[in-house]
Amino acid sequence: MESLVLPEGVVAMRGQTGVSRRRILRAIAGGSSALAIVPVLTLGPRKAVADVDITQFGAWLQGVREEAAARGVSAATLDEALNNVAYNYDVVALDQKQPEGTMTFVDYLARVVNDNRVKAGRDLFLQHQVLLKRIGGLYGVQPRFIVSLWGIESNYGAQQGDYRIVEALATLAYEGRRAEFFRKELLNALEILEHHDVSAGNMLGSWAGAMGQCQFMPSSYLRFAVDADGDGKRDIWNSTADVFGSIANYLASNKWNSNETWGREVKLPAQLDSKLVSLDIEKSLEEWRKLGLRRADGGELPVIHKLNASLVRPDDTTGPAFLVYGNYKAIMNWNRSTYFATAVGTLADRIEQG
């Protein structure tokens, strides 16, 4: 079973970190980093917050400045972005926190795809239906999936995070356990600022560097963010059109098929080889039917020619099982968690059912 990080801020922090009660309560209420639960990475020995020598942080930032300048980032942009950056102990504390426990998929789904989020998604789907139809048609992505990802990543833009992205990335890069990854993302963030799509003060997001209403890391922003409203900026913080277009462009760039859905819950036979539960194994729906799989309500699987599916079980040997299609793998490219991908598909279905 995947080891899961509990919502951001739930773990009790040391007094000196300054993690506010407001942030903890907001995280528990739900938002991008609180709900986009992903597998824990093995990062090596954890260091206490106080173990990091920050006396060289200023000199280290100077090195970042020089590297960014060599890439064409102007002195004015670098001054705006870096002059007030400090080592952020809150960010390090959140990154170093140990999981307090685990959450089953059923519990996770009930939390992420709750009635309030479904209702809000349906209302917003109707409110933005003209824009969604245009964006969906342009990129070949069904609008309900755009709204679903928007809802799960940032609660429809309401919870984007209030950390300064440059400071958060600089802190994580300097702290060192994933220095190369976060330094690259920091340089990408500085490149974004050079394009003047957003100011350093308004480049806000999660403590881990994910930005805006669709929670793109800077590298994803550079690859997939689009100016869908035609104002000359790719504004995933404030422009609904840019958020929708960026989400759709990401999925389309990852082999999304507008003629297919994501998958369906299925009922398994009493005896089934557990090795068949794998995203690496694909069989036709007819082959799965012959192996004894049925719809969740016990009915026969649909007869759809040339549609292959993989069998996934978010909690491995217990809990619900799903037959998933190619679009599911596109969602997995966004976030490599079966919890997350299945929740996106489930929310999209419930939004459409409204």
Image: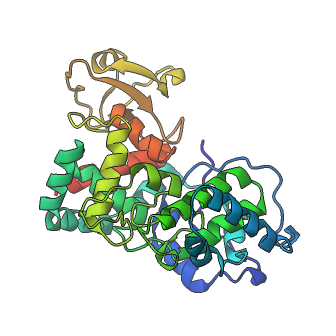
Q: Quadrant of the C terminus?
A: bottom left
Residue under the image location 74 percent in, 68 percent down: 62
Q: Is residue 173 left or right of residue 299?
A: right
Residue nearer the viewer, 66 or 126: 66
Q: Is residue 107 left or right of residue 255?
A: right
Residue under the image location 60 percent in, 55 percent down: 71
Residue nearer the viewer, 194 or 151: 194
Residue 290 shows up from this direction: yes
Residue 98 shows up from this direction: no
**Which percent across, then down, holds residue 47?**
83, 62
Q: Quadrant of the N terminus?
A: top right
**Which percent across, then down, holds residue 85?**
67, 77
Please determine whether, in this image, residue 48 is positioned above or below residue 338. Answer: below
- Say which quarter of the image contains residue 95: bottom right
Q: Is residue 1 left or right of residue 290?
A: right
Q: What colouring style does the render use?
A: rainbow
**Which percent across, then down, holds residue 88?**
70, 75
Q: What is the number of callouts on the image?
A: 0
Q: Is residue 140 left or right of residue 282?
A: left
**Which percent across, then down, holds residue 193?**
50, 67
Residue under the image location 52 percent in, 42 percent down: 315
- Say which quarter of the image contains residue 141: top left
